[in-house]
Image (cartoon, grey):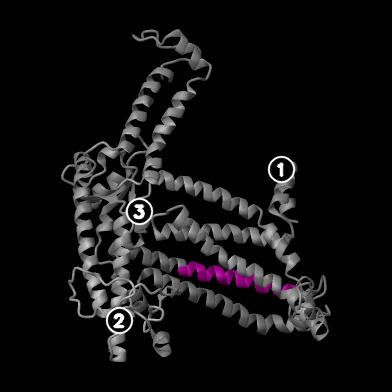
C-alpha cells in the first residue's frame, strides 16, 4: 500500500477525501518541506561553521551556535541563513495560501463531491427564536410574510435526549449484531454469549462479553426473532438471534418516538407551559416597569424638554428617576432577556431556540442575512448555515446566550491560566531534575550512574519532555472545554477555538521560557512604567 499512497495524485486525494483532508495533507507536506530544507542546508552550511568555531563547547553543543565565541565574524553565517530560511518559509506559505484560496472559491461555487445536497448554501441558521415561533409551521408563516413566496422550508431543532439515548443504544445493538455475523463468517460457528455479562471498551473498541462461554442458566435459541419475551440476564443465547430480536424491538421503539416528535414539531407549543408562563409574566412586569420607572426619551438633562406632552410623570417618580432608582427597570429587563436562556438550558424544553430557514434563491438569502428580522435586535439572529456534517447535532439545540456566557467564562479562566503559565513551568524546572528523582526511594543510583552523565542527560532533557507533554495535552483540554462546556455547535468553531487558545498558550510558553520570567511580573512593570514597555518586553 505504500507505493500506492506515494503515487496517489493530489486530485484523487481531494476527490476521495474532501477539501478538509486535502488541505490537512498539504499542511503536513508544507511542514515537511520547511523542516527538511532547513535540516539539509543546516547540516551542509551551519555544521561546518559551528564545528570549526573556537567556543570550546562539548557534546551536541559542538555543532551549535554555542561553539562560536562572542563577536565572531562567523555569526554572520547563521544570521544570513535564518533570513534566507525565513523568506523561504514566507514564500511557501504564500503559495499554499493562494492554492487554498482557489480551492475555497471553487468549493463555495460548486460544492464538494462528498456533499450530495447543496441545501445548506440556500439556508440560514436562526438563533434565539421566541416561544411563539418555535414550530416549523409558525416559523414558516413568519418568514413567508417577510419574504412572500421565497421560503422553501423551515425546521426548528428539537431537544430529544430520550430519543438520542435510544438511538445510541440501537447503534450499539446493530454494531454487536454485525460483529457476531462477522464472527460466524470467520470461525464457521454461530457465536454464543450470556446475557448481562460485562464488556471492556478500549480506544473506542468494544470487546466480546467476558467469560462468554462459561455459565448461563439455559438456552433461549429457539425463540423466534419477533418473540414477545426477551431472554433474561444470565441466559446463554445465540448471539445473532438475540441481537436480531433486540434490534427488532429497538427499531419499533425508535419509530414510535420519531413519529411522536415529528407530530410535536409540526404542532409546536399549543399550550402555555409553566416555563413559558414565567417568561410571559416577567415580560409583562418588564413592560409595566419600563413605562413607569424608565425616563422618557423626550426628557431633558434636568426637566422635560417636551412641554406639550399630554401625560406628565408624577413628581415622586420623577425624583426617583433622578436618584438612580430606575436601575430596577434595567434589572427587570435584563432578567426578561435572559430568562429564556435559563429555561432552555435548565428545564430543557423540547422545542429549542435554534432553527433553519431554506430559501428558494440566493438573492433572497443574501437580503435576509442583512435585514432586521425582528423589532428586538437580539431576537432572530441569523447567519449562513454550516454544512450538515460540520454541525455538532448534540449541541444544536443549546441556547446561543447560554453558550456565549459559558464561552466568556472559559475565556476568562483560560486567560488566567495563560498569565499564570509560569507556575507549571517553574514547577517542572524545579522538580524534573536528577537530584529530585534521587530522593525517591530506590532511585539514588541515578545521580552517580556512569560518572554523572545520566544525571546530566536527565537534567537537560526531562524538563523539556515534560513541558512538551503538557503542551501536547492542551489541545485535548481545549477540545473538551469547547465541546462539552461551551456547547459550540459546529466542528469548525471548535477547531477555531482550539487553534486560537493554543496559540496564546504557545506565546505564553515562549515568553516565559525565553525571558525566564512571568507574564504577571512583566505586566506589573509595564503598569508602573508604561513608557518603558518596549524595553521591558525586550529584556
Q: Residue furthest bottom?
A: 188
Q: Quadrant of the C terminus?
A: bottom right
Q: Residues within 10 Å of mark 3 (few under 14, many from 20)?
A: many
Eyeballing the image, is 515 above or below 209? Answer: above
Q: Which residue is mark 2?
A: 180
Which label's residue is closer to the chain start, 2 or 1? 2
For the record, the magenta segment spans 75-96
Eyeballing the image, is 449 above or below 81? Answer: below
The magenta stretch spans residue 396: no
Left or right of 148? Residue 99 is right
Residue 446 or residue 199, whichever sits in front: 199
Q: Position of residue 185 (x, y in %)?
A: 28, 88
Eyeballing the image, is 141 above or below 448? Answer: above
**Dot 1: element:** helix
Asked which quadrant contains residue 272, the reply is top left
Q: Position of residue 4 (x, y in %)?
A: 39, 88
Q: Which residue is mark 1?
A: 527
Determine the residue positioned at 52% across, 20% down.
Answer: 324
Q: Which residue is mark 3?
A: 396
Spatial distance from mark 3 to mark 1, Cα to Cα?
43 Å
Q: Residue 263: which numbered mark, if any?
A: none
Which label's residue is closer to the chain start, 3 or 1? 3
Q: Are marks 3 and 1 in contact (CB under 8 Å)?
A: no
Left or right of 459? Residue 494 is left
Q: Nearer the viewer, mark 2 or mark 1?
A: 2
Q: Nearer the viewer, mark 3 or mark 2?
A: 2
Determine the residue positioned at 34% across, 9% down.
Answer: 310
Residue 381 or residue 424, whichever sits in front: 424
* Res 112 visible: no
**Dot 2: element:** helix
Amino acid at each position: 500500500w505504500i507505493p500506492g499512497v506515494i503515487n496517489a495524485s493530489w486530485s484523487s486525494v481531494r476527490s476521495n477525501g474532501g477539501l478538509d483532508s486535502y488541505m490537512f495533507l498539504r499542511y503536513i507536506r508544507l511542514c515537511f518541506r520547511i523542516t527538511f530544507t532547513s535540516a539539509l542546508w543546516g547540516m551542509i552550511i551551519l555544521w561546518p561553521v559551528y564545528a570549526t568555531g573556537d567556543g570550546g563547547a562539548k557534546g551536541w553543543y559542538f555543532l551549535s551556535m554555542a561553539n562560536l565565541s562572542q563577536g565572531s565574524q562567523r555569526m554572520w553565517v547563521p544570521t544570513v541563513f535564518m533570513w534566507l530560511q525565513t523568506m523561504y518559509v514566507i514564500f511557501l506559505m504564500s503559495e499554499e495560501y493562494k492554492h487554498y484560496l482557489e480551492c475555497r472559491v471553487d468549493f463555495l461555487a460548486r460544492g464538494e463531491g462528498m456533499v450530495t445536497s447543496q441545501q445548506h448554501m440556500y439556508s440560514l441558521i436562526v438563533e434565539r427564536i421566541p416561544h411563539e415561533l418555535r414550530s416549523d409551521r409558525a416559523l414558516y408563516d413568519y418568514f413567508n410574510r417577510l419574504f412572500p413566496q421565497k421560503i422553501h422550508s423551515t425546521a426548528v431543532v428539537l431537544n430529544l435526549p430520550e430519543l438520542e439515548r435510544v438511538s445510541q443504544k440501537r447503534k450499539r445493538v446493530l454494531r454487536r449484531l454485525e460483529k457476531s455475523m462477522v464472527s460466524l463468517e470467520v470461525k464457521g460457528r454461530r457465536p454464543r454469549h450470556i446475557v448481562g455479562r460485562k464488556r471492556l471498551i478500549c480506544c473506542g473498541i468494544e470487546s466480546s462479553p467476558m467469560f462468554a462461554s462459561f455459565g448461563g442458566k439455559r438456552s433461549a435459541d429457539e425463540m423466534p426473532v419477533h418473540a414477545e419475551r426477551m431472554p433474561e440476564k444470565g441466559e446463554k443465547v445465540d448471539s445473532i438471534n438475540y441481537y436480531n430480536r433486540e434490534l427488532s424491538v429497538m427499531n419499533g421503539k425508535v419509530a414510535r418516538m420519531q413519529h411522536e416528535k415529528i407530530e410535536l414539531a409540526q404542532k409546536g407549543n399549543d399550550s402555555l407551559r409553566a416555563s413559558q408562563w414565567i417568561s410571559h409574566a416577567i415580560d409583562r412586569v418588564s413592560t409595566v416597569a419600563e413605562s413607569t420607572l424608565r425616563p422618557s426619551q423626550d426628557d431633558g438633562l434636568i426637566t422635560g424638554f417636551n412641554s406639550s406632552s399630554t401625560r406628565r410623570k408624577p413628581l415622586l417618580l420623577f425624583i426617583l428617576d433622578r436618584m438612580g432608582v430606575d436601575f430596577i427597570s434595567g434589572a427587570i429587563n435584563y432578567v426578561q432577556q435572559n430568562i429564556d436562556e435559563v429555561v432552555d438550558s435548565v428545564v430543557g424544553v423540547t422545542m429549542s431556540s435554534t432553527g433553519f430557514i431554506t430559501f428558494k434563491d440566493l438573492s433572497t438569502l443574501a437580503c435576509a442575512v442583512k435585514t432586521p428580522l425582528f423589532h428586538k435586535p437580539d431576537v432572530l439572529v441569523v447567519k449562513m448555515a454550516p454544512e450538515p456534517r460540520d454541525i455538532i447535532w448534540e449541541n444544536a439545540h443549546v441556547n446561543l446566550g447560554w453558550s456565549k456566557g459559558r464561552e466568556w467564562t472559559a475565556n476568562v479562566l483560560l486567560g488566567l491560566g495563560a498569565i499564570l503559565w509560569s507556575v507549571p513551568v517553574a514547577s517542572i524546572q524545579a522538580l524534573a531534575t536528577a537530584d529530585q528523582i534521587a530522593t525517591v526511594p530506590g532511585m539514588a543510583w541515578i545521580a552517580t550512574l556512569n560518572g554523572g552523565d545520566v544525571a546530566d542527560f536527565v537534567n537537560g532533557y526531562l524538563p523539556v519532555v515534560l513541558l512538551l507533554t503538557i503542551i501536547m495535552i492542551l489541545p485535548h483540554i481545549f477540545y473538551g472545554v469547547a465541546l462539552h462546556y461551551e456547547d459550540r455547535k459546529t466542528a469548525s468553531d471548535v477547531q477555531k477555538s482550539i487553534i486560537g487558545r493554543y496559540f496564546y498558550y504557545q506565546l505564553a510558553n515562549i515568553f516565559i521560557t525565553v525571558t525566564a520570567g512571568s507574564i504577571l511580573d512583566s505586566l506589573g512593570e509595564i503598569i508602573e512604567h508604561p513608557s518603558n514597555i518596549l524595553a521591558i518586553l525586550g529584556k
